C-alpha cells in the first residue's frame, strides 16, 4: 500500500501525538504541518516540515496535482475550545479530511469513525459506536457499544463512556472521567477530570465531582 499524503493543521503538542498515530498505521506520509507558529519540538523532534500559516497551506494545496492532493487532519489539542477546531475545518471545508486510528487502538468492525476523527493509542471503540467528524478519542479512552460521540467532541485520556450513551457535538469529557451507560451529555458540555456522570448533562453545562454536579461555566475542570 502506498502511503497517502497527509498535512497536519496545528503544530502544538497535540500534533506530535497525531503525527505518531498517523505514522503507526503505515497508511500516511506526513507532508508537513500548517501553523502560524507551532511548537518547535513538533518540527525538530519528529522531523516534520513547517509549511507555514493558512495562506501557505492554501497555496500548497492549490499547487498539488489532483492525484497527489494531500489529506488534512486537525491536530489542535483537545483542551482548545471546539470553536477553534471548527473554524479551521470551515476554512478548508472543500478539502478531504483523514480519519486516523492508531495501530495500537482497537475499533470494532461494526463501529464508524467519521472523516477528521482521531482515535489514539490504547483506545477501545466497541460494537456499533460512532465517532463523529473531527472528534478526538484520546489515549486509553473506552467508548462502549452503541455510543454516539458527536462531531468535534473530545474524549480525554483514560475516560470511559458506557454503552448507549450520547456525547453531544463539541462536548469535552475530561481525563479519567466516567460516564454511565444510556445517558446524554449535551452539546458543548464539559465533564471535569475524574468526574462520575450518573445522569443527563445539559447542553453547555460544566459538571465535576463524584457524582458529577453542575459548576459555573467559567470553572476550568478539564
Image (spheres, helix red, strand yellow):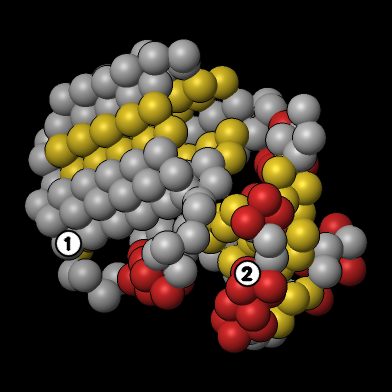
Residue at x 72% of width, y 35% of height: 27
Q: Give how far apart the Cα atoms at labels 2 and 1 are.
A: 36 Å
Q: Which mark is residue 204?
A: 1
Residue 129 lies left or right of residue 197; in this view the side is right
Q: Earlier in the sequence, mark 2 or mark 1?
A: 2
Reading the image, the residue beneath label 2 is 61
Q: Position of residue 181 (x, y in %)?
A: 22, 23
* Viewer-nearest residue: 30 or 136: 30
Residue 52 in sight in this render: yes
Graded by Cα atoms within 10 Å as few (under 14), some (14 to 19) or many (20 or more), the crowding at tag 2 reads some
Q: Secondary structure at mark 1?
A: loop
Residue at x 32% of width, y 49% of height: 151
Residue 121 lies left or right of residue 109; in this view the side is right
Residue at x 50% of width, y 53% of height: 96
Quarter of the rendering occupied by the C terminus: bottom left
* Viewer-nearest residue: 69 or 200: 69
Q: Position of residue 8 (x, y in %)?
A: 64, 61
Q: Position of residue 187 (x, y in %)?
A: 19, 54
Amino acid at each position: 500500500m502506498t502511503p497517502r499524503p497527509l498535512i497536519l493543521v496545528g503544530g502544538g503538542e497535540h500534533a506530535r501525538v497525531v503525527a505518531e498515530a498517523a505514522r503507526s498505521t503505515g497508511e500516511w506520509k506526513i507532508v508537513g504541518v500548517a501553523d502560524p507558529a507551532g511548537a518547535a519540538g513538533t518540527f525538530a523532534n519528529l522531523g516534520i516540515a513547517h509549511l507555514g500559516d493558512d495562506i501557505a497551506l492554501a497555496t500548497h494545496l492549490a499547487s498539488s496535482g489532483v492525484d497527489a492532493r494531500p489529506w488534512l487532519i486537525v491536530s489542535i489539542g483537545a483542551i482548545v475550545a471546539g470553536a477553534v477546531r471548527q473554524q479551521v475545518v470551515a476554512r478548508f471545508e472543500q478539502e478531504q479530511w483523514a480519519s486516523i486510528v492508531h495501530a495500537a487502538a482497537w475499533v470494532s468492525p461494526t463501529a464508524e469513525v467519521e472523516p477528521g476523527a482521531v482515535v489514539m493509542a490504547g483506545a477501545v471503540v466497541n460494537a456499533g459506536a460512532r465517532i463523529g467528524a473531527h472528534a478526538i478519542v484520546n489515549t486509553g479512552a473506552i467508548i462502549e457499544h452503541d455510543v454516539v460521540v458527536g462531531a468535534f467532541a473530545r474524549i480525554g485520556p483514560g475516560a470511559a463512556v458506557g454503552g448507549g450513551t450520547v456525547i453531544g457535538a463539541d462536548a469535552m469529557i475530561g481525563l479519567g472521567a466516567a460516564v454511565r451507560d444510556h445517558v446524554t451529555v449535551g452539546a458543548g458540555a464539559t465533564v471535569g477530570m475524574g468526574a462520575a456522570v450518573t445522569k443527563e448533562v445539559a447542553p453547555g453545562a460544566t459538571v465535576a465531582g463524584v457524582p458529577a454536579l453542575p459548576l459555573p461555566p467559567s470553572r476550568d475542570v478539564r
